[in-house]
Amino acid sequence: MRADRLVSLVLMLRQRGRLTADTLARELEVSTRTVLRDIEALSAAGVPVFAERGRHGGFALLPGFRTELMGLNHDEAVALLAAGPGHAERVFGLGPARAAALRKVIDALPESHRAPASDAARRFLVEPETDLLPSRSDAEKVPAAVMAEIRRAVLAGHKLRIHYAATDQPPRWRTVDPIGLVTVRDRGYLLATRSGADRTYRLSRVSVAEELPEPAQRPNQVDLERIWRERCARFLSDGHLTVPLRVNPRRREELLNTAVAVRAADPGLHPDPEGWLRLEATYQDLRHAEWALWQLGTDAEALAPAALRTSLRDRAAAMAARYAESPES
């Protein structure tokens, strides 16, 4: 851990020039005293770092000193730098590691390419916090200590003990064999097995996690994308209601936020002659589908099943009849 921090400290000084101990401590998320000890360790190891006194003083490297990290071309560096700090830093609690990696990416480039790559990356914005549509859902929060413990168990191939609250159930302890981690639309999932049976856990519902020393019972090689696809298919076919529908593109995000899942229907996301999208939305049951589509009013139309169309029609007729009457004085 300290070795990574020392490398990050050197790269920050190389890329940004003179920095104060307070700035270094804030960026590295350590105390000022720790920074001073790290500076002493670097000097003892032969890294030419020196202190400048005065109001605008700080620590700097001798001009011309550089580390070597080769193998990245310009487009590869731009792709990594453009990944975006907001969304990417939240993924599985790896924000600090990502920041350190990006410092190494920048330092890997030749001097003449460093500024152009950074400038180019600023032209891309990935997963911003603010959306054009007002209904964007907040990312689920997972305590850092919980996420770190889960991540360690997944990578080490050890069993994992979690205190988990399933839907409409009190939280209880479970011991699982972790397979991998998946993030979809700012929601994180742990794919695992429990007593040999497939299990999928929402990370936001894990309050405590503990990596166990026993090895997990899992295959050495894993196709996480295939496993996730198969589990999604089983989940969507297990007692849920799939509704083919048309929706005004302006309300698509609201549809996504009220359905269990939404898939593109033929011809995909291309609008129909009226400019609407044809999609397939999955709901928990008929009642859930009626409630969700009622929120969209005339900006959505369920094409099937007949029972859903009938219930929405009767509800609209009852509403129209209610407001056709004059209010009582």
Image (cartoon, rainbow, N blue to C red):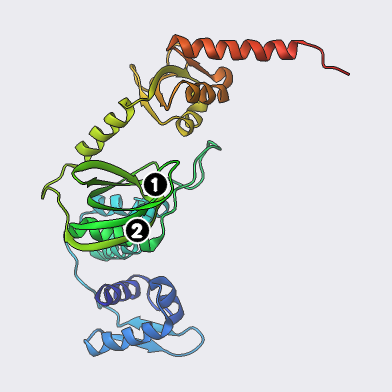
User: What amino acid type should be assigned to the residue bearing mark 2?
Assistant: Met
Residue 165 on image: x %, y %: 41, 48
**Left or right of residue 321, residue 275 in this image:** left
Return the mark for residue 312.
none
Mark 1 = which residue? 124
Task: Find out whether the residues at labels 2 and 1 contact each other: C-beta distance under 8 Å.
Answer: no
Mark 2 = which residue? 147
**Left or right of residue 230, residue 201 in this image:** right
Q: Can residue 109 be seen here?
A: no
Q: Secondary structure at mark 2?
A: helix
Extreme residue in the right direction: 329
Badge 2 crowding class, 10 Å Cα cut-off, few under 14, some 14 to 19, many 20 or more, is many
Q: Can residue 163 be seen here?
A: yes
N-term-proximal mark, 2 vs 1:
1
Closest to the camera, between mark 2 and mark 1, is: 2
Residue 73 on image: x %, y %: 21, 54
Q: Name the one closer to the observer, 312 or 98.
A: 312
- The quadrant holding residue 99 is bottom left
User: What amino acid type should be assigned to the residue bearing mark 1?
Assistant: Phe
> Which part of the image, by quadrant, shows the N terminus?
bottom left
Q: Name the one closer to the observer, 189 or 71.
A: 189
Residue 77 on image: x %, y %: 27, 54
Badge 1 crowding class, 10 Å Cα cut-off, few under 14, some 14 to 19, many 20 or more, is few
Residue 318 on image: x %, y %: 65, 12
Extreme residue in the left direction: 220
**Left or right of residue 281, residue 320 in this image:** right
> Which part of the image, by quadrant, shows the C terminus?
top right
- The quadrant holding residue 223 is top left
What's the distance in space between the residues labelled 2 and 1, CA to CA? 28 Å
